[in-house]
Image (cartoon, helix red, strand yellow):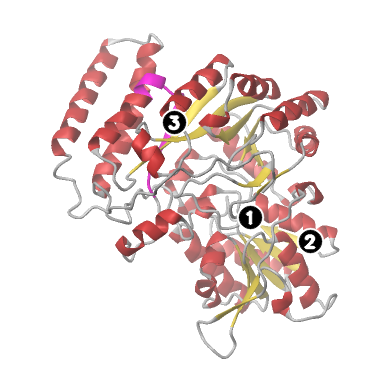
Amino acid sequence: MVDILLAHSYFLKYDAKQTAKMKPYPPLATLYAAALLRDRGYSVALFDAMLSDGEHEFEAALRQHSPRFVAVYEDNFNFLTKMCLGRMRDAAQRMAEIARRSGASVIAAGPDVGDHPDLYFRHGVQFALVGEGENSLVELMDALFGRHPGPILSIAGVAVPDPDLPGIVRRGPERTPERSLDCFPYPAWDLLDVERYRERWKIAHGYFGLNLVTTRGCPFHCNWCAKPIWGQRYAIRSPANVAGEMALLKRTLRPDHFWFADDIFGLRSEWVKEFEREVTALDAAVPFTIQSRADLITLEVARDLARAGCVEVWMGAESGSQKTLDAMDKGITVDEIAAARAYLKGAGVRACFFIQFGYPGETFEDILATVRMIRDTLPDDIGVSVSYPLPGTRFHEMVAEQLGPKTNWSDSGDLAMMFQGTYTTPFYRSLHDLLHLDLKLRQRMVSGQISSELLVDLDRLNHAWLELGRLEAEHRSAAPTRIPKRNGVLARPDLSKRE
């Protein structure tokens, strides 16, 4: 018997797009919570859904460990969790029901839980954690075990169902996120079946990747980006703390690659420089990938990243239309995107773009501007999506009246428009495929791989673009969403502070 079984509900097998990619990463937030609970004297077990064959394995874990408590603790550092995919919500609800039938008390935590705790209470969850969950979970366990008796609702970040009024949620005080991240122990990596991950990675890619995180939160203002856990605040681990974990993992788990799951890595150039020094001093360098912003990539930052081991940077370029970037409150320019790509290329680092179509007010001319930007800069890779209204964002508020019964994608490959954009879902799905193909063929062309087959493919591509342009009027929405124009420009966050 253990005190608590920690679990999460991201079953890779339920997401066809991510299964095809086969880049499974361990549940970082779940492992952080496990490490902190163990530090406080609780016995802990882990059910990792990522590579599981289904909920029957969760039932087996319940029989094996006989936990008094189960915490379905979602990985807040996984962008797929922040999207609150429908299939994963269903899985979490089924897991809660199974845990209750086994006799365990059930706790749930994650972005979707914080937004909609009532949807989980209906399925057997007794305690919901809202916001940053580690300290709330420890304090809740202390109260439930009688270590620190007192009202449950005196604990910050806890919500419970009202026992007398069905559908009503009672909440404790708001949880203030931890500012000094070095206080958290390293994730409980020993609970992970590392070899299972290594095998999947090696078969699919020939190398093994692990994930890390250096920050929590993001101070920028992109109005479609949800911040359900940390809000507008951010906090940063010290460079020495991060390099120490990298060195430990390099010696013990032997990854070939790191993925830094931060919303934005290296918010301050001086942090990046110190990080490079610490990594070098500890011989901790392992090739790694990060997410950043175009306006944070200078020539010096690009060189420091490369020296520290960075091989790839994903940037939220979003659009080649300055009008669209400004409407998103993105806070960057098309010129900065091009410059960042050039700096990274000069430092020998792959530069990749996240592209977003379907933002309200976008025209076919804006789409073509994005296509031109991709052709002019030739990023090493792109990820293409459509605007996705997440609860708690200004964007969600702007399109809320247009939302129908479908408010979440079922999986990450859905690409469904959930409000009336300029065009319909099939148009954007075709655009997704065409832009990927366009980049792939042009990369082959500039690399000198010109062949008769390539020329035929380029000719077909041109015809496909012409056909999309011919049909674009037929795919226009009858009543596309209009959003009010905001006066003024949002102030750039002060990155010298941790707020």
Mark 2, residue position = 37
Image coordinates for residue 164, horizontal then vertical, percent:
57, 91
Tag nearer the camera, 2 or 1? 2
- Earlier along the polypeptide chain: callout 2 or callout 3? 2
Mark 1, residue position = 48
Q: Secondary structure at mark 3?
A: loop
Q: Is residue 380 above or below residue 229?
A: above
Q: Secondary structure at mark 2?
A: helix
**Discs 2, 1 touching: Cβ within 8 Å:** no
Residue range corresponding to the magenta coloring: 374-387
Residue drawn at x 41%, y 28% as measured from the top left? 334
Q: Amino acid at mark 1?
A: Asp
Q: Secondary structure at mark 1?
A: loop
| Extreme residue in the bottom direction | 164
- Image position of 467 (left or right of 30): left
- Earlier along the polypeptide chain: callout 2 or callout 1? 2
Residue drawn at x 81%, y 50% as measured from the top left? 183
Tag nearer the camera, 2 or 3? 3
